[in-house]
Each structure stands twice: as C-alpha cells, then as structure tokens.
Amino acid sequence: MNILLQCPSTLSGCVLASSPPPFMCLQRWFSIRGGGPPQWPPHCVPAFLLLVIGLVYSELMNSDIPREVTNSGKLHIVHGLFVGIAIVGRILHRLGICHQVSFIRWFVACFLTGSNPVPAGLRVKDLTFSEIPVRVYEPTTVCSGLRRGLVYFHGGGWVLGSIESVDEVCRYIAKEGDTTVVSVGYRLAPEHRYPAQLDDCETATCHFLSVAETEFGVDSHRVAVGGDGTGANLAAALCQRLARKEDGHLPFPCAQVLIYPALQMVDFNLPSYQQNHAVPILFRGRMAFYFLQYLSGDVSLCQDVLEGNHVPTELRPSCVEWLSPSNLPAECLTRGFCEHPAPDYNGEVYHAIKAGLEPEVSPLLADDAIIQKTPPTFILTCEYDVLRDDGILYRKRLLDLRKDVTWEHVKDGFHGILNFFNHGWLSFPCAQQAVDSVVEFVNTL
C-alpha cells in the first residue's frame, strides 16, 4: 500500500488552485452542514486514531530503510510523519473538506519549513520576474567585480515543494559561494500541467539573464541553472531547450547543477529502482505517479508505466543503448539486479503519455547533437535513491561526448536530503556533504 500514491487527478472540496488553508475549509464545511462540528460518538475519535496509526504502521512495514544511512532511526520517524500527513490529507479529501495535495502543502509550509533569521552578510528579497515569483539571495560582502549567479528550481515531483522548501539551501549556497542565487516559484501540478513548469523556469531564467548585470551586479556569462529532483529535471530540460533555440540574444547558462535528477520516464526497472524501490522518501511507484501528474493526471496508467508498456517498439533500441545497466559502474549492481522481461507495448498508454518520452520531460533521451551543446555539468547522486542511475547514466552520455562533468556520490544519502538541510532535528549529516559539494562546484564558475 502506498498512501501518497492515492492523490487523484480530479479535485473535490476546495478548488486546489486557490484553496484556502485547511482550517478555513473546515469552517466552510461545518457551516454548510449546520454551523458547527458534528457530534461524533465518544468511540469515534479513538477509532480514527487507531485507523491512522494502523495505516502508518502498515506503510512503515512496507518500507526499507538501509542501516547504512546515517541516523536511519530518524529517517523512520520522518517517513512515518510524512505518511501520517498523507493519510490525514486523504481522509479530508474523502470527506470533501479539502484536497489531499492542498493539505500536504499547507502542513509542510506551516510546520516543516520555518525560516531562521537571515544571516549577516546576506540580503534576501521576494520579487517577480515577468510575473513569476522568485526569491533573490544576494551576498552583501564587497565584491571587486561582477558576481556569479545561480538560478535554482526546487524539487517536489512537480506537485509539491516551493521557494520556502529550499530556502536554507539557497541561503547557504549564496553566502558560502559568494553567489547571487535566484529561487524560482514555478507553477505546480495538478493545477498546471507540462509544459507550464518548464515555461516558468525559462521565463524567470531569461529575465534574470537580461538584467543580471544592471540590476544585480552579476556577470550574465557566469550564471548557472540547477535544481534538485524534478527541479534538476527542469534545469537539464531548460539547457536543452535553450540549446535548440540558439537565438543568441542572451548568454547561455555557464553550467547546470543537477542534484539527484529525474531524467527519464522510460525505464522504472533500472538497478537503482529495484534496489531502492521502498526506500523513503521516494518510492518507485511514487516517481511514476509524479510523472503522470506532471503530464496528464491519469494515475490509472501507473502500473502500465512501471512495467514499461508505454514505450514503442521502435524507441527501445535507443533506450537500450542509453539506459542499459551495462553503462553503470560495477558497484551499482552489487546490491542485486534482475533483468526485466520485455514489456507488452500498449498504444493507448503511449498516446496518453507520449510527451513523457520527449527530451523536454526525459532529457536523458536527447540526441547527441543537443547534449553536445549543453554546458559543463555537476551531478550529485545518492546511493539509496531510485533516481541514482538516472544521474549516473546521464554522466555516461556526457562523458561519451567529451563534456565536462563533475560527479559527487553520497554513499549514505537518500532522495530528498536537501529538504532537511539546516532544519534542526530534521537534519541529516549527508545533507551537509551534498550542499558543500554544490558550493565547491559553484566556486569554480
């Protein structure tokens, strides 16, 4: 059972795109049903709590938290917390009170993304770039010339995440890397489907490139793009989109920073997907769910996508060439791997998600000529992450084309470690290693 996979594409209760906080939804719900909370029988509250506890326990029993992860016990607690939030959100959705995604976003924003005071030596401003909300982090130390810049796209499966969720990470990169960082608040699914997210990232990036020097004292030729998870997907896709255009009106990003990137929707049976299929906080099935939410919202296709039934026969030779486990280092296979049998192609499934096999959604599938035009790349992967092999396989393609690649592998890391950076009791040591490696790369630009 995977509760977080049960977020439907249709909206009920409050309209998700503009829904008020859940407590306001509760007030509205009560007023519609008679002006006050229902008088539940005394035994209902304990029964409700037992239900939630039972579902959380079941989910935890189906998870696989490696002992090699530093503070693995804490990851158990964090995973249980997230599962509990999702279950309560699901119940509220079933009752018509508010949408599950709306509840999860509200809870995370209120309780899990509190900001610390802005540190000395840093200025933080909330702005809009061509109507796209952004947060700009500017070092206030004296600089003899123009600074470097980084445009950052948060992760969250194109569904969750926000400027707030990566606030601590962006602050740290800006201050320790003496870099002006722009964090982009792009639109999210299910309210907005592909390519809205990528369009917003392009709009914000091009706006910043056009005003970097005059308004922010940043060298427009030293501006990189980057992100984590699906934000890294957007960064890679954006570099390829700009490479295709080659309009010459604006400088090209000087680098791409890809932190545990999601780079392909073809094969959900790579070794990392098999080895880490139940490792929090990103399960194998959940990644397919996020791709479907990004594209169409039809999560009924999830099992077909996981099996590979959406991939046309004529596309499979190139997929084998680029996605073959033989392209991975030997250590990626040591924890076990079974060759997946050839799937049965389903044309209806393909036509429903065919945009997902295009390079703008699966940058790993881009032609050599386009990848050849992309800038120097930093790739960070985590051992206990279903997306580990996406990053490693993209590194292989870049190296085969003699592109500059810097690779950092976090041996005790799991997907989403940046979300816990500098968050008190939620922090994991591997998050510090990850962010420090990003700063080290940015300092070379």
Image (tube, rainbow, N blue to C red):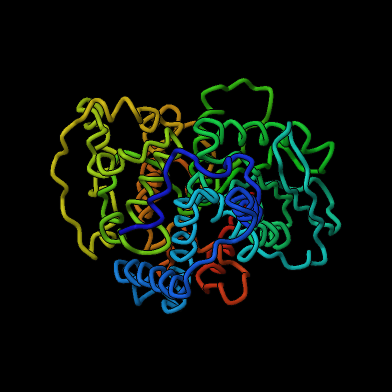
- Establish if 316 lies above or below 336: above
Q: Is residue 72 left or right of residue 214?
A: left
Q: Quadrant of the N terminus?
A: bottom left
- Residue visible at 21% across and 29% down in the picture: 346
Question: Horizontal and vertical percent for residue 361?
Answer: 43, 35
User: Where residue 182 sits in the image (x, y, percent)?
Assistant: 70, 46
Q: Is residue 267 above or below residue 351?
A: below
- Count every numbered label the image shows and give the total: 0
Where is residue 50? Give x, y as percent.
Answer: 39, 73
- Whether residue 443 is visible, yes or no, is no
Quarter residue 288 falls in: top left
Residue 193, placed above or below residue 112: above
Judge from the rendering whether residue 130 lies leftward or rightward of residue 224; answer left or right: right
Of residues 20 and 423, the one drawn nearer to the viewer in this rendering = 20
Q: Position of residue 320 (x, y in %)?
A: 23, 38
Q: Residue at x 45, y 55 (%)?
A: 90
Res 113 quadrant in image: bottom right
Q: Nearer the viewer, residue 82 or 148?
A: 82
Residue reaching furthest to the left: 341
Residue 22: name its quadrant. bottom right
Q: Foreground: 49 or 174?
A: 49
Q: Is residue 193 visible to the viewer in this orientation of the structure?
A: yes
**What residue lies at 75% left-to-right and 31% top-to-bottom?**
210
